[in-house]
Amino acid sequence: MKFTTLLILYLLLFTSCSDMSKNSEKTALVYPETKKTEVSDDYFGKEIIDPYRWLEDDRSEETEAWVKMQNKFTHSYLDKIPFRNEIEKKLSSIWNYEKISAPFKRGDNEYYYKNDGIQNQYVIYSKKDDEEAKVFLDPNTFSEDGTTSLGTLSFTIDGSIVAYSISEGGSDWRKIIVMDVVSKEILEDTLVDIKFSGISWKGNEGFFYSSYEKPKGSELSAKTDHHKLYYHKLGTNQKSDKIIFGGKKDEKRRYVGGQVTEDGKLLVISASESTSGNQLYLKDLSKKNSPIITAVANFDYDTYLLDNTDDKLLFVTNLEAPNMKVISVDANNPQSSNWIDVIPESENVITPSTGAGYIFAHYMVDAMSQIKQYDYNGKLIRTIELPGLGSAHGFSGNLEDDKLYYSFSNYHTPSSIYKLNPTSGKTELYWQPKIDFEPMDYESKQFFYTSKDGTKIPLTITYKKGISLDGNNPTILYGYGGFNISLTPSFSITNAIWMDLGGVYAVPNIRGGGEYGKAWHNAGTKMKKQNVFDDFIAAAEYLIENKYTRKEKLALSGGSNGGLLVAAVTNQRPDLMQVALPRVGVLDMLRYHTFTAGAGWNYDYGTAQDSKEMFEYLLKYSPVHSVRDSVDFPAVLVITGDHDDRVVPAHSFKYAAELQSKHTGVNPKLIRIETDAGHGAGTPVSKIIEAQSDILSFTLYNMGYKTLSELSEKDKD
């Protein structure tokens, strides 16, 4: 169906959206028609129809026309919500405060990120000793619309040269620019087509980076399945960059990265086939043509470099330690049989950093931070006293640093920066934001609820003090549950507005995440994935049973793997919530591995080609394939970016089309597609505010609120 035909159809259907604002009762929407084609695949003798396969080509004119049509239809709905503009004004107002990052030192300069308030991108400032800070790099000048963002920022050890990557339109494909720190002169041609890469310098001569060969469109090809580590010598053409690892048949891996030790002596190479488990290799950079030697030969566990002193390497690993430990390795004899424990595994997951010659072990205790300081031999120096219960990040720096910084926040406390004297252990407040939000008016409480199989799950609930547990509080339940990623307390301006309006914000630490180590992660992978959904369902039931909210006031929210979580639970339990907000979700579980980076997610999901049993398991919960006919689904707002090349937008396109095709009842099933946007990182603040205004408005409106004053009156009651 051509765009002109779709436009005529839209104009005919528009009145159904317009009528929404005129009637006190909702009326069923008549959605734009999405073409169906006769496409199918055979899985172990079972034919699976894929009528929206054509939407996988997100660069075709037909798909672009569909995107424009859906966006017009969606915004015709959102724009009629009476308090939508009021929410945007509130968000813009509270967002407009100064934010800075913890400083870090490179060479003679100290650097930090800063946003004056509602700048689209954070600006990097530099400062030497007691001199006034100056703008070092301003990503807001990279593009007129603010959609070009800064990625990795890497300085040489002496701080004289910097290499930084940029992303255009939210893409994971990056460019690398090399600049003289003092003169700001660009030193050479820009490197292009770089993906999933760090930048690690070898002296001032050049740097290591990683990439694939860039494909055409979204589909993987045999070449793009293999990541390579390159060495770029400064002043030479990118075409002459040497492949260090990944160029040989026996070196083909999906993810490859390289890190040079602080003393510049060793290159540590990590290679993996998925997002869990990696091989590790070492190369002596002090010797010409030195061989690459193997430190970890298989993919059974995760190991990464923490620091080194000469030939003594400090690794972090979960080999025989599901909660991670720090070990000492002799670079000349790095096999695991010779590893020595420095900080043994404990009952809590450890994520260490180093600075000023110390190890700072970040222990996760029921998703809250606890920091202990050790020397490089594993001797406990002290426990760092934190400002309260929440998340602390930082404690990293160079060997010679005499002060370190860390940030602290929780669900109702904006991030503040603290300065630590690593010798005395004295901590002092370095910077605190001035924001129109009073943390003392809010509180967080952690509870443990029981999931379907009896597992105890932690749940943190945050709200304005004094709320009534009468079941009438608008509530957002946010979850992730995958890829060993932990949800720890953090402050969100959007959530601040939500709670200021009287809303409750709840976060469960469900299985599939990393809050309790590798066993917790594995309990939510492959054919145990239903545990993740059951944990989330049980969290919703706990909130309802304890009268924080009720079905009509509950929204589920999550992004990426969390988008899968929300959509799968919505399909399984549409009676449980009033609003579902799946964002940039992995929603086609039969074909996810055929797009861009998707093949690397098989550790968590498995693939439909693995076995008949795995195929049937995926088919059962795959959101695109489990939308049922004649079911009164809740209000659904699917959210994605048209340039997302990590979780390609076809996932969201197909799911929205299925919902609209099979819809029953009056609750809207809409899709909001951000243009010139990717998976989320680097999104301009202006676009974030617009999107969050739409999401909050959609949520509250579909909970039955017609004005924000209704929420204010509830607070008075």
Image (cartoon, rainbow, N blue to C red):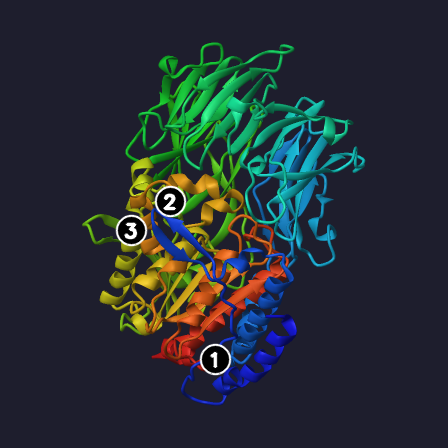
Q: Quadrant of residue 120?
A: bottom right
Task: Identify the residue at the far left of this view.
Answer: 454
Residue under the image location 51 percent in, 73 percent down: 33
Q: Where the C terminus falls, by quadrant?
A: bottom left
Q: What's the residue at 73%, 50% (across, down)?
A: 142
Amino acid at the residue labelled 2: Tyr
Residue 68 % position (x, y): 61, 68
Q: Which residue is mark 2?
A: 605
Q: Position of residue 145 (x, y in %)?
A: 70, 59
Name the one closer to the observer, 157 or 77: 77
Q: Are marks 3 and 2 in contact (CB under 8 Å)?
A: no
Task: Say if 654 sits above or below 419 in the image.
Answer: below
Q: Residue at (49%, 45%) from the top-left corner? A: 594
Q: Amino acid at mark 1?
A: Val
Q: Quadrant of the N terminus?
A: bottom right
Mark 3 lies on a secondary structure that is: helix
Which numbered dot is residue 30? Answer: 1
State which quadrant residue 109 falls in: top right
| Mark 3 residue type | Gln
The residue labelled by disc 3 is 530
Is label 3 in contact with label 1 (beta carbons under 8 Å)? Answer: no
- Compared with residue 568, is residue 637 higher up or lower down, i.e. above or below? below
